[in-house]
Amino acid sequence: MIKRELYMSRIRPFIGTDLIKVMTGIRRCGKSVMLDLIKQELQESGTNPAQFISINFEDMRYSHLQTAEALHNEITKRASDTGGKVYLFFDEIQEVRDWEKCINSLRVALDCDIYLTGSNAKLLSGELATYLGGRYVEFVIYPFSFMEFMELYHSIVPEEPIQRCFQKYLLSGGMPYLANIRYEEEPSKQYLHDLFNSVQLKDIVKRNKIRDVDLLERIIAYVMDNVGNTFSATSLAKFLKNEQRTVAPETILNYIKYCCDAYLFYQVKREDLQGKQILASNEKYYIADHGIREAVFGGNTRDINLILENIVYLELLRRGYQVTVGRAGDKEIDFVCDKRGEKLYVQVTYLLASEETIAREFGAYHSIRDNFPKYVVSMDELDMSRNGIKHRNIRDFLMAKDWA
């Protein structure tokens, strides 16, 4: 179990407060481990584990507690047996019907500290906002960064050079469980394939009552194939029409939204940097874990340019940036990043192999006159920084403590 200090440093200030701590993210990205890390920290600071009440709602032993009333009665009883403050850890809380009412009531009625995990972005919308408005903090948990991957991979293959580690990361991705099967190729692929099926079935099909599963599968396949490419629902509708499937762009957008709600995909909007406005169409999508793409569809090596973009995009999210795709005149900037007013620009390419590529990647910044850091990130080993624009090898970029 690695410490995942990036998240712990954000959660730590809220431990022991009356705000509800909610951890969300794709299934199996390590949310349960975060609960264990919080328990460990509480114990180290002197809290008695007898004060912990932990329930994983995907465990059939707790299926009788999957309504607000049943859960409320059970926790109230167990809390009175404990005496004093209780620490509640609820894993995959979305399995409990009307859970918001129960959690809000427990918050009011008990001396408690509450931690929840869930695999759906809608967890914190609608009704929850009504019941818990302003009384919760959310932390999105992502699969392993390259830095976290290295920490675990080196515990299995201590002598592996960083270049080989990155090649492995390109194909395996960052799902934590792969360390348990020592990142062996076939078992890893099978695990990721089964995980993908589970996300598709439980978190997308079942949760949204989708009847046309074939259509969903085709849409997911298209988005995975076009990770990092701009496309519109209309262009996807035309593509499906060629495959003898007539479907409205609105239906396509709904299906993609369900995938984003399950944290399978992330949508990135396009921003006009000169007009300072968000553009209405042709968003980009990235996948939560590029290892899933390799296991299910293959082609990460063939589409390496897009996969490198995907890896950098997730790293920007991990570090707390709001990210858009920038347009400046006829030039496009892969990532325009903002964290509380501090900006960062990032261009990602496979190799700066020709003068033409160098001119295109560095030239994208030509019309941007501010003094915020501008990066070109690639697999090249030589530093090609110029005109105040920093060039970094992607491994160095991902391992850097900060990018100021």
Image (cartoon, helix red, strand yellow):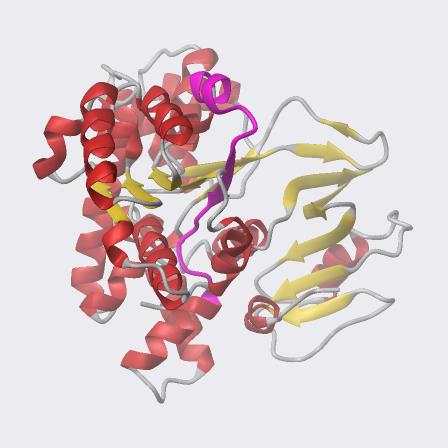
Residue 144 at what x, y percent from top left? 41, 60
Residue appearing at x 48%, y 69% in the figure: 147
Question: Which residue lies at the image location 71% right of the left edge and 46% below the top edge?
Answer: 338
- Measured as percent of width and height from the top left, residue 129 is found at 50, 21
Depth check: 324 or 104 in front?
104
For residue 397: magenta? no
Asked whether, in this view, residue 252 is left or right of residue 244, the answer is right
> 87 above or below 257?
below
Residue 178 appears in which quarter of the rendering?
Answer: bottom left
Q: Residue at x 70, y 65 (%)?
A: 403
Q: Is residue 169 left or right of residue 313?
A: left
What's the residue at 20%, 36% (across, down)? Answer: 57
Residue at the limit of the structure toward the bottom, as seen here: 159
- The verdict on residue 143 being magenta is yes
Q: Which residues are magenta?
A: 126-146
Query: In terms of depth relative to the viewer, which is nearer, 89 or 355?
Result: 89
Instruction: Name the residue nearer the viewer: 282 or 89.
Output: 89
Q: Position of residue 139 (x, y in %)?
A: 49, 44
Q: Nearer the viewer, residue 350 or 285?
A: 285
The quarter of the picture where the C terminus appears is bottom right
